[in-house]
Amino acid sequence: MKAIKHLFLALSVICAASAYADTTRIFHDTQGRPLEATFVKLEGDTVYLQVVATGQTVGVPVSKLSAEDQTAIKTMTPAANANAMTSVATNASAHDAAAKIDQLVSMGLSQHGVKPNAPLNDEQFVRRVYLDIAGRIPNYDETTAFLKKAGTDKKARAQLIDDLLESEGYVSNMYNYFAEMLRIKDRSVDGGAFVRGLPYIQWIKDQLKANTSWDKMVSTMLTAEGKIWNNGAAGYLLRDSGMPLDNLANTLSVFLGTDVACAQCHDHPFANWTQRQFYEMASFFGATTTLLSGRDYNQAKLMAEVSSAVESGGQDPKVLMNQIRNTVIRANTYVVQDLPENRTKLPPDYRYKDGKGGDPISPKLIHWVPPNKQLKDVIKDDERLACYKLAADVEKKAASVKNTMKYNKNPMQKQTKSIGDMNENLRATFAAWATHPSNPRFAMTIANRMWARAMGQSLTANKSVVDNPDDAYNPPLIKHLANEMIRVKFNLKEFLRIVYNTQTYQREATTADLAMGEPYYFQGPVLRRMTAEQAWDSYMTLVLGEQIDKNKNDDVDLYARSVDMDLSNPKLDAPTVLRKFQAVRDINTKQRAKVGGGLAKAGEEMMDGDEMKIATFGNMKLMRASELEQPAPPGHFLREFGQSERLLIDGGVKSGSVPQVLMMMNGQAQNMLTNHDSLINRNIMKQGTPDQKVEAVFLSILNRMPTDRERAIAKKAISEEGENGAFASMIWALVNTREFSFVQ
Amino acid sequence: MSNPYLKLDPASRREFMLRTAKTAFGVSVLSHFDSAFGASSPAPSGVGGKAKSVIYLYMAGGMSHIDTWDPKTGDTKGAKDPIKTKGGFELSGYMTEMAKVADQISIVRSMSSKTGVHEAGSYVMHTGYDPRGTIIHPTLGSWAQHFLGRSHKTLPSSVVIGSGDANAGFFPPALAPVPVSSPDAGLQNVRSNIGEGQLKKRLSLMNEFDASFREKYKSSDVKAYTEFYDETMNLLSSSDLKAFNLNEVDGATKTLYGTGGFSKGCMLASRLVQHGVRFIEVRLGSWDMHNYVDQGMNRLGTEMDKGFAALITDLKQKGLLDSTLIIMGSEFGRTPRINENSGRDHYPKAYSTVFAGGGIKKGYIHGATDKDGREVTDKQATCQDFIATVGAAMGLPISEVVMSPSGRPFTVGDKGSAITELFA
């Protein structure tokens, strides 16, 4: 029976790959009520339809359809992934949904004659799942508690997944992922960005904590207005202030799995994107500015007043004036707002026949054209999708506007109503299209990314390109995961819960090298080195224990309150500017006051009045990577271990280097762990016998019991060095093993 | 789209390439060492061959050509007037220190690139190749190590100072430049707070505890890490480590460079050259001046001006300028027109690179742009020509085809032509 089912699925994949869009239409019920849906399959008296608006697949009795539809469905080809689409009930449990994924994975494996890896044991599971969900290794107590429970309780794993998804660690770890993907920086001097990223960073963390759905998060970022501290989501466009084209290329890449960066300057050499198409997409953001210019407020007058009011107190007045300008005045010029005119024009060096440099370009959405199809046919199909429909009106209107309006010298003033409204609609339209369940790539892109997070490898060779899902390593699986993302309504936590509950995830990591560029069929996750953040946060686990998530970076409120002023207010005077400047300067002093307590106190609750104190070792603040400077400064453990500079999408590096190994041998973080006062050392010494101490050091660092051989080696070390020296050496040795830094 | 590499993302590509390189070449610490360094290199390309070391000053973000090496007087001039220099040509008003040593440099004012994107532009200015989904191309330090072997027994042959990518392209990872994130810190963490004997003991404990894991996971990622530990131990036992220590620089030299971060990077580069490191890149970021270019130039331009000039003076005083080539490059220039945010945008069509020492002419201007700095009007040079020129200066066989592990042919500078007029 099972074999037959597999055969049927395999056949349907091969036969019906391209039939999907042909069967999207408006269905009617017997009372003439319309429903836009894609035909999935006909099974006995039930017809399965995927509702375009919600992405959900529903089973409907054939008799409820209009007579015309009843006839039509008899000749329709079932959807390529029909079984996947109908096998998971709308309200399926994570367990059932996971089973469906496993089924698709095992089909892929058997199709290619690959055997699945062995299941994970509990020790491997507890370490991996903490690292993957909470971003750190489990501490000694967490490890032993789980191992004990798992011995008797079959549901222990699912329960741990649920608990970790609700933990603070989940937020921190997800933030690290998105910070790398979205290239989030706090302070950036590139191109003179003088506004801090703190409020944006906090906004992302807040959304993850509230588990805001992904479609809502993205759409909020794309449509945000205002200053960063009034609306953290504005940070997304402000990140690339002055480079809207780069911002768009990144938007399409991270949210829609389409790499069009080449088309910024010329027609894409490998894909179907033309430079003109790129500019048509850019046009949706062409009526938006991210920076006030000196013309938008009375800069000269204000600076003159400040200059005469300032007392330099011995400091070079020119330097001081620069600081004032950069830290407070310019910070207030970073504002996302819509303009009365669309400024998108073809670049001066445009060299294709369909336009010339300087031509105004009106907004137009792209279409994904599979290799075996023509653009015009795809457009016809896409026009039926809700996401393209809702944009059609705005596209049409925008194209009819003659771009003759002069640039309004003061964009802060209200604009001509109709055109102003229309331009405000541009971003909203783009966002609605981009994040709609019926968008052909939005759900798939984030589903593929989340899959890659859990498995160490995406379903496509490049996780930023899902242009052609039929090229994926397991096409039915990537389509199914996209449907699942839609089914769970872009609830990332729910989606991850399903993935972590799969047997596929709970298998041993693949030990062999993956052949170069060869497809991977997910016999298990891929062996991968910890990210820099996972390594640092694991170190923090060893010195902070259960206090690890107690300290948060709360500079954001202080910053917002200190820096905000209204540049457009003619009454803004020099004393106000100077007061703001002083307040921003004082942030550092206030930050320093929060630091207190050394290693011996780390891991305990350190309160000073109402304020939690942050423990330090040397110049390292002992906090999660997500609470430290974004990104960490050069030379910090995080950077040496490969933390992204946050310049490129997914820019973290996982390869070694001589300087990195030097740090792992002699670095401050190592000195911290081996120090007698560190929590790990204190915990080990609390144990009774030397053998129990050896168990504790293994359970704390590698989250497993030592083998007999390892116990013997440890015993020998203790006899040679004495306990104090030997355990410092063992800690050093264990964090330096490949077993520590690779996630198996 | 039949080639699977085309589809890989950069991280996967890097990983795949590293793996293959390792399988194909193996990683060996000393195998590339030979006596080529210090010997007078032949000049297989017919010109050059005088530069035993190279210091590449890389201006990340896109350096405005008009505000530095190709000053203009018309509408596109910017905030400062051009100034007269010792080289007999004019430089932008921000280049006051360089003006004093301009008789030592040559400028190529006719650079033109095809890409206005940072990553792609930076990539081609380091490798001579456009980024491709199929392969990572090596940078010049790795090319040199491939052809000439290691430049020193224990010290790395290439170093990158300041943040930046540091991989060996399709060569084995042992040919990758060693990154130094801050010149003051030098090579970080070389001193241990335990003795060498204790360190060795800990390493052997590590190897014993790790044995079963390494037995089970024989992936080349895991192996590569083990090799990095071996190489690190070799470096630690070398007495040449002081090359990275700026504290040992004499007072007069310190005064010459001053305390700017970039200046110190230049000072470290000079010191590394003295100790036998062949290729050093010093990076200075934040040139992406879309907004407020004048303020940007006052800050960054001044820092660059001081460091570059000090480096020329220092190497000249030490008698190393003839054997050390200094080059300055950036991914592109910036728009002649100043935008509404008082900044300049990306401009690959016309920009400048600078050469000094290492067998290059002194006080020579190669090529030109029009009166506004918009178009190259004479002797256009490509990124490939730039890389080929440096390769030729180092005596690398720039036309020799090297096969990558995946069996594809590559050359230093992707068949670019060395700019022969630059050589003295």
Image (cartoon, rainbow, N blue to C red):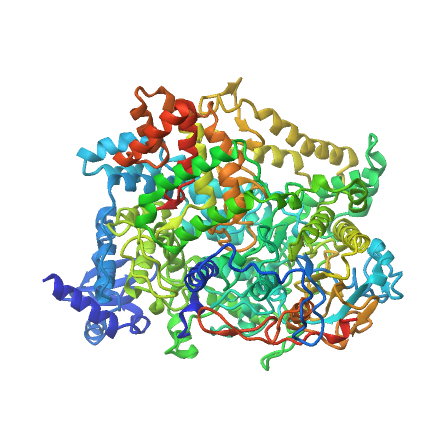
* Residue A459 visible in this rendered orientation of the protein: yes
Relative to A179, is B79 above or below?
below
Judged from this view, the residue extending furthest toward the top is A609
Q: Quadrant of residue B312?
A: bottom right
Q: Closer to the camera, A643 or A354?
A: A643
Q: Quadrant of residue B15?
A: bottom left
Residue B271: image location, x then y, percent: 70, 49
Relative to B414, is A509 above or below?
above
* Residue A45 visible in this rendered orientation of the protein: no
Left or right for A311, reference A690: right
Relative to A400, is B203 above or below?
above
At x 80% / y 56%, what residue is drawn? B316
Total number of numbered labels? 0
Judged from this view, the residue extending furthest toward the bottom is A353
Left or right for A232, reference A12: right
Left or right for A47, reference A657: left
Residue B361: image location, x then y, percent: 80, 68
Q: Closer to the camera, A215 or B105?
A: B105
Q: Closer to the camera, A156 or A384?
A: A156
Residue A725: image location, x then y, percent: 43, 26
The N terminus of chain A sits in image quarter: bottom left
Q: Closer to the camera, B26 or A88?
A: B26
Q: Quadrant of residue A408?
A: bottom right
Left or right for A587, reference B3: right
